[in-house]
Structure formats: C-alpha cells, structure tokens
C-alpha cells in the first residue's frame, strides 16, 4: 500500500479531509472548482453526464452539482472510506444525481460521457505506464470533443527549486491552519512521491492519451489545472 493509499484508508485522515485536505493545501481550491464548472459548462449539455475519477471526498462533485442542476454524475474511487465521506458531503439533495462506484476508472461504465474530471489524483499514480493508462481509459469513455479537466501538483524532482517548492507547499498548509503533524506527514509523502512529474510531462501524457485543445487555466504555486478535449 502506498503512503497515499494509507491516508485514504485512515478514518482519522478522512474525518479531517474536508477542513484540512485540498481546501487547506491548494491555493484557491473553491475558486478552482468553480472554474472547472464554468469550463465544463461551455460544451457540456445541460442534462449531461459527467465522469468524476477520484470522486472520494465529494468536494468536486458537490461543487459541480451545485452549479449545474441538470447534470448527473458517475464517480469512481477505490477508497470505500472516501466514498462514504462523499456520500455525506453530497447530502440528499445531490446524491440522487450521483452514482458512486468503488473502484478505478476501469470499473466505470463505458459511457460515452459528456465530460470528465481528474482532480488531485494523477499525481499519486506512478509514471510507469499507469498514468497513461488512466488517461486513456478516461478518453475512451468520452464522446469526441467532450471536455476533460485535470488538476494536479507538478514539479521537477531534479530541479533547483524542488526543495523551495515543497517548503512552500508545507508553509501554505500551515498558514491554512493544518495541524503540524498532518503537514509533516504530507510534506514527507510529497517529497518522496513517486508519481510527481513536471507540468510538461502531464501535457505530453494528455496528448498521447488522445486529448487535444489543451489549455492551462490555473496555477497556484506548483498546483496546475488544464482543460482539454477528447480528440475525434
Ligand atoms: C486528494 S483526493 C481527491 C478527491 C477529490 N477529487 C477532490 O478533489 O476532493 C484523491 C482521491 O483519489 C483516489 N484515488 C487514488 N487512486 C485512484 C485511482 N487509481 N483512480 C481513481 N481514484 C483514485 C483516492 O482514494 C482519493 O479519494
């Protein structure tokens, strides 16, 4: 089990996730989710079906469901505990429009879906063919031209700024009020993260997986967001 898998199976980590998870680590997290909704809505039908890969926690699905009352969602996530949290975060209002599946994208229906998201997941997946397979499995489930949003933390482990960047990552979380022991654990996991790649590498993977029209829409320190479209 990787360090990240241990986190998402740990009831204490999951209980703190909404307060001390992505909103406390990624600058402008709520604004990013709002941008994701705006970008997807440009080309997604009002009754579209959105594939949310890594839907545990429910924050991204909740934000999108609140923005677009006609969208329906299929969310997949391998962590049962994170899916339980998603059910509670989504509440009764949204949960009628959301199907949650325990598993990876390979366990998702074939679609075709009208849009897809992969938010704060790809950075935990090793770049040994697994990242490319995940992106291809998403692409395969999208109708041609459908929008896809990727949000991820990127860096160059060999770069001269690596240490500075990871210190800033931790300092931002501390400034958000995250408990010191949580920050320390996250710092070590990120420092050793085998899935960490550069933004250029993610862009190359997106192209190789069959996405076109790639456009960066967000950067907060080393956190990045792209919108791209399933190639015809
Ligand atoms: C940092 S959370 C992000 C959750 C959500 N997208 C958000 O932004 O709040 C990462 C999630 O990815 C899930 N995950 C890990 N490996 C995955 C995979 N191969 N496919 C889909 N989800 C995965 C974890 O279980 C966890 O729930």
Image (cartoon, rainbow, N blue to C red):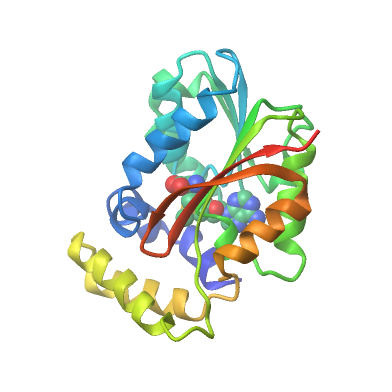
Q: Number of numbered discs present?
A: 0
Where does the image place residue 195, in percent across and percent down from the top left? 60, 70
* Relative horizontal placement of residue 218, taking residue 6 as reference (left or right): left
* Relative horizontal placement of residue 79, taking residue 31 as reference (left or right): right
- Nearer to the camera, 72 or 2: 72
Where does the image place residue 20, in percent across and percent down from the top left? 29, 56
Q: Is residue 53 above or below residue 181?
A: above
Residue at left 35%, top 56%? 26
- Residue 81 in sight: no
Residue at left 35%, top 60%? 12
Where does the image place residue 14, in percent across and percent down from the top left? 40, 54
Q: Is residue 4 above or below residue 184?
A: above
The quadrant of the picture occupied by the C terminus is top right
- Nearer to the camera, 2 or 137: 137
- Residue 45 in sight: yes
* Relative horizontal placement of residue 49, taking residue 207 as reference (left or right): left
Q: Is residue 38 above or below residue 119?
A: above
Where does the image place residue 90, in percent across and percent down from the top left? 41, 30
The quadrant of the picture occupied by the N terminus is bottom right
Residue at left 50%, top 54%? 120
Residue at left 72%, top 37%? 230
């Amino acid at each position: 089990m990787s360090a990240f898998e241990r986190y998402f199976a740990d009831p204490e980590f999951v209980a703190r996730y909404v307060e001390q998870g992505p909103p406390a680590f990624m600058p402008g997290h709520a604004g990013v989710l709002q941008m994701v909704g705006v970008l997807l809505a440009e080309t997604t039908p009002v009754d579209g079906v959105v594939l949310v890969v890594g839907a545990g926690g429910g924050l991204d699905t909740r934000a999108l469901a609140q923005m677009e009352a006609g969208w329906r969602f299929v969310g997949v996530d391998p962590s049962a505990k994170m899916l339980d949290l998603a059910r509670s975060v989504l509440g009764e209002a949204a949960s009628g429009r959301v199907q949650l599946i325990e598993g990876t994208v390979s366990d998702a229906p074939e679609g075709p879906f009208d849009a897809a998201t992969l938010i704060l997941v790809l950075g935990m997946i090793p770049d040994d063919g697994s990242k490319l397979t995940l992106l291809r499995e998403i692409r395969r489930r999208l109708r041609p031209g459908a929008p896809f949003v990727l949000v991820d933390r990127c860096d160059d482990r060999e770069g001269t700024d690596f240490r500075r960047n990871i210190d800033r990552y931790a300092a931002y979380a501390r400034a958000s009020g995250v408990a010191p022991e949580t920050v320390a654990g996250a710092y070590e996991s990120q420092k050793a993260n085998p899935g960490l790649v550069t933004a250029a590498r993610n862009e190359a993977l997106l192209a190789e997986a069959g996405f076109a029209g790639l456009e960066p829409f967000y950067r907060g320190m080393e956190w990045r967001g792209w919108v791209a479209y399933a190639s015809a």
